[in-house]
Image: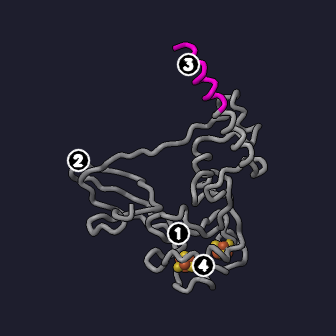
Amino acid sequence: MLDVGRHPNIKLLAYSELEKLTGEAGNFTATVRKKARYVEEDKCTGCGACREVCPTPVIDLYNEGHAERRAIYSWFAQGIPSTHTIDPDHCRVLTGKKCGICQKKCQAGAINFEQKDTILELPVGAVILATGYDVFDPSRIPEYRYKEIDNVVTAMEFERFLSASGPTEGHVYRPSDRKVKAEIAELENKVRKSLKGLEKFEKTMA
Ligand code: SF4
Ligand code: SF4
């Protein structure tokens, strides 16, 4: 992604959505909405000083709801471009209240509450359709009791727990009470015992 961000022949339009595609192969026109970040991409250095002083907590969906971010944020640490974004649904200024702390803190002068969405008309020769995906909702299988038991997590949530940049900085804790290490050791013991039992059984069968 870093290479893509730096490549002289690639123009990366992050935080943007394709609104319309007209024309035909070799001669398309793509209408793209570049959403307002309320942060000037070319000025923002990604230093994070604004994020540290923002008083507004927001549930962090990148971490599957197991952490909090601020109303000014970067979606994840290695994101390209590394610019920050203000969440218009939660920012105090953008929801009609008083604040502006991030603007005072930003030495680069990158915060711009007046920024608007931009509509781009791009002449395009070919289109690659990459749909992405939605994560399966485990509550559709009642046997998992996903919504009832805090310690039932999806593979994606577990990945965030294992990640050094995740909500537990790579330490595996039990979500309900943030304890678990002892239980993991106990579980490993049980697995070892089961494996020994299995080996014994296989020998007797040989
Ligand atoms: S908006 Fe300003 S303070 Fe925030 S990350 Fe960008 S440069 Fe740093
Ligand atoms: S103006 Fe919005 S983004 Fe900036 S510090 Fe206040 S709440 Fe956070």
* 3D distance between C-alphas at marks 2 and 3: 62 Å
In the image, which is nearer the foreground, mark 1 or mark 3? 3
Which of the labelled discs sits on residue 37, or is there none?
A: 1
Does the magenta-highlighted stretch encompass residue 194? yes
In-front residue for pair 178/1:
178
Q: Which residue type carries mark 1?
A: Arg
* 3D distance between C-alphas at marks 3 and 4: 60 Å
Which of the labelled discs sits on residue 25, or is there none?
A: 2
Which of the labelled discs sits on residue 202, or is there none?
A: 3
* Residue, far left: 26
* Residue, far right: 177
Q: Does residue 79 appear left or right of residue 23 in this picture?
A: right
Question: Where are the magenta residues, as a range?
Answer: 193-206
* 3D distance between C-alphas at marks 2 and 1: 32 Å
* Residue, far top: 205
In the rendered structure, which disc, 2 or 3, sits on the residue that comes first in sequence? 2
- Which residue shows up at 67% across the image and 80% down it? 101
Q: Is residue 24 visible?
A: yes
Q: Is mark 1 within 8 Å of ligand 1?
A: no
Q: Which residue type carries mark 4?
A: Ala
- Which residue shows up at 77% across the image and 37% down it? 148
- Which residue shows up at 57% across the image and 37% down it? 136
User: What predominant SS class does the magenta segment belong to?
Assistant: helix
| Disc 2 + disc 4, Cβ < 8 Å | no
Q: Is mark 4 within 8 Å of ligand 1?
A: yes
| Disc 3 + disc 4, Cβ < 8 Å | no
In the rendered structure, which disc, 4 or 1, sits on the residue that comes first in sequence? 1
Residue that numbered label 4 is attached to: 49
Q: Quadrant of residue 138?
A: top right
Secondary structure beneath label 1: loop
